[in-house]
Amino acid sequence: MIAPPDPGVWPLFLARMILGLAISLAGTALAVEPFFAPASTSGSIQVQLVPTEVVTPGGNRLVTFGVPFPRGSLSVAGLSTLRVLRNGVEIPAHVDSMTPWRHRLNAALDGTSVRVARIQITYAFAGTVAEPITVAWGGPARVLDVPALVSARSGWHTVTSGSYVAADNVQEPDVYAVLPKDWLGMGALKGTRNAPFDATNLEARDNPSTNAAIEHWPAYLEADRAAKNNFYSLVNQDSGAVTVANQCHYKTDFEPWLYDRAASMFALYFRSGFHASLREAVRASDFYTDHVNASGFFDLKDGDTKYVYAENLAYRYWLTGDDTALNRLAAIVTAQAGFGDNWTPGTGFWTERHAAFKLLANQISYEINGGSQASAVSTLVGRLVAHQNGANGQIPQPPGYVDGGLYHLGSQHDGDWADNSFGASSWMSVLVVDAMLRAYSTSEDPAIANFIRRMGNFLRASTINTTDHGYDNFNGPLALPRYAMLSNGSDGQVDASDVEHALDVASGLAWANYFAEMTQQTDSRLAETAEDLYFTYDEGVNFWIRPNGPASGLPAYRVSPWRKYGWEHRVSGGLGWATLAATATQDALFENGFD
């Protein structure tokens, strides 16, 4: 592990040392926190109903929203016990199942419990601020049942606030239903669990001068704060002094949408429970799908499958109950079919990023629709596993060969390394890990667990310690994931800017460590490298804060390039949970404040 060169890094360094000691003491796997949150067969949650500016007190409004449940919590028959209470009194509600928990490999689990239940009520606000309702299940049967579902869009309006104008034709609910962050953190929507934001991380943007003066936050709180504060820059709410030229031009420029801008905002909501992130995610998703053409491509970057995403559609559907969110899902899956994922040395163009988004689109379609999509997902997973296994001997294993990468020729990867050399990309591989995690959530496939574990070996080997990292606020070496590494461990392509992928690669390593522990193939280097990379990211957060930026028309919380928010935060929400839930010893740390 990297020694700290100055006293300012000691708080975080000591936390890392304690975690490293715990990992060492654990030896072979003692236990892992279960991948799935425990079933909740009865209980209740408080939901905040937040009115938008179109709502007036006393007027009835249609409110439609989804509530996710951990696997095994509620059968379809059990939906009869789902009730909505206002001030402890049941109110009329329509309730149905939007999506069941599916399972590709175990028929006994396939479709037997509700993953997302849809609730529709009519509600009149007493005033203009948020009001709580209670959703309860597993107790008395619902008495005030509303049999018929009304189109959720009957309770939506055209957005004319924030960065949107009426001509953008973006729609949103009149009323948002905001779920508790602890409930969202159980992972029923993302497919993986997360550690919710701590109670001190409030919804409002932090003062940049205050945050710039805090060199290190405990544990993973630096990433949590950055996810929130950089979000406001992403939606042009960093400071009113930021000039138009320096704002994020997401309505006309395709670049901010790479890595699924809308899904990245939903990921922030899943960890924070913030209304602001939910609202902007829904708006962004509606804008995105309005710009997906009949062929399934995003019209700001037509013909490029890097910009073809299904994930945000699923989240909008599940959280708002709006069936029209899925109108382009089939077209998106068809667009992704154009990428040849069945790799061979003669395939032509191939990258991990393209393979990841193809699997993700098919996996989302399976989660929503089931049926024949199960075989499509199984085929794609099988091809990735076969590729990692050497593609039936088509990938040579030279001296120093590093196991775990999806090696392919530089000529197939836009020439980012020597044309005839076999290499792979670290941060693009994390996109594959993210898609495979989602596939694991509906299969518990041991082949996927092993794939992610072995990918961690590649990610660990791709990480180097270097002083050429570009962060002039840190005097010393930092862990840096090389953009491309050849199969023998040598450089494929490396640049100081690779430091900007420290958080996402750390997340991939954290999940690799989790599955290594689960399968009792402990490798302490996985968690250690993940922590080294997180330390790099921690240093980088301060580098990108400029409190005096707005005085010159610039954001205080810099996000450059804009797509960086997506590559960092869409895939890393489970980092803290995966790291600290990997062993029984780490669980003890988790329970004692390292969250």
Image (cartoon, grey):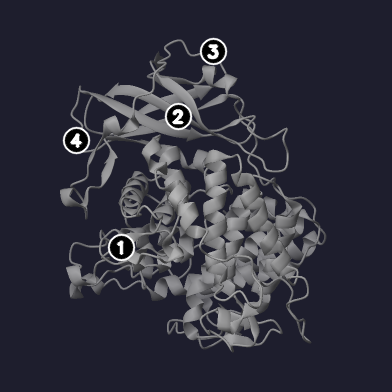
Q: Amino acid at mark 2?
A: Arg
Q: Amino acid at mark 4?
A: Val
Dot 1 or dot 2, earlier in sequence: 2
Residue with the mark numbered 3: 140
Dot 2 or dot 4, earlier in sequence: 4
x then y, percent, for residue 40:
61, 30
Who is closer to the viewer here, 160 or 423? 423
Q: Residues within 10 Å of mark 2 (few under 14, many from 20)?
A: many
CA–CA distance between discs 3 and 1?
46 Å
Q: Residues within 10 Å of mark 3 (few under 14, many from 20)?
A: few
Name which residue lies at 53% across and 81% down. 6
CA–CA distance between discs 4 and 1?
25 Å
x then y, percent, for residue 552:
19, 75
Residue with the mark numbered 2: 118
Q: Residues within 10 Å of mark 1 (few under 14, many from 20)?
A: many
Q: Against 263, is 397 above or below?
A: below
Q: Amino acid at mark 3?
A: Pro
Report how many numbered discs are placed on residues in the image. Answer: 4
Q: Is residue 507 visible?
A: no
Tags 4 and 1 in contact by the CB under 8 Å rule? no
CA–CA distance between discs 2 and 3?
19 Å
Tags 3 and 1 in contact by the CB under 8 Å rule? no
> Residue 95 vs residue 436: left or right?
left
x then y, percent, for residue 564:
42, 68
Name the secondary structure under disc 2.
strand
Where residue 322 sits, quadrant-wise, is: top left
Residue with the mark numbered 1: 233
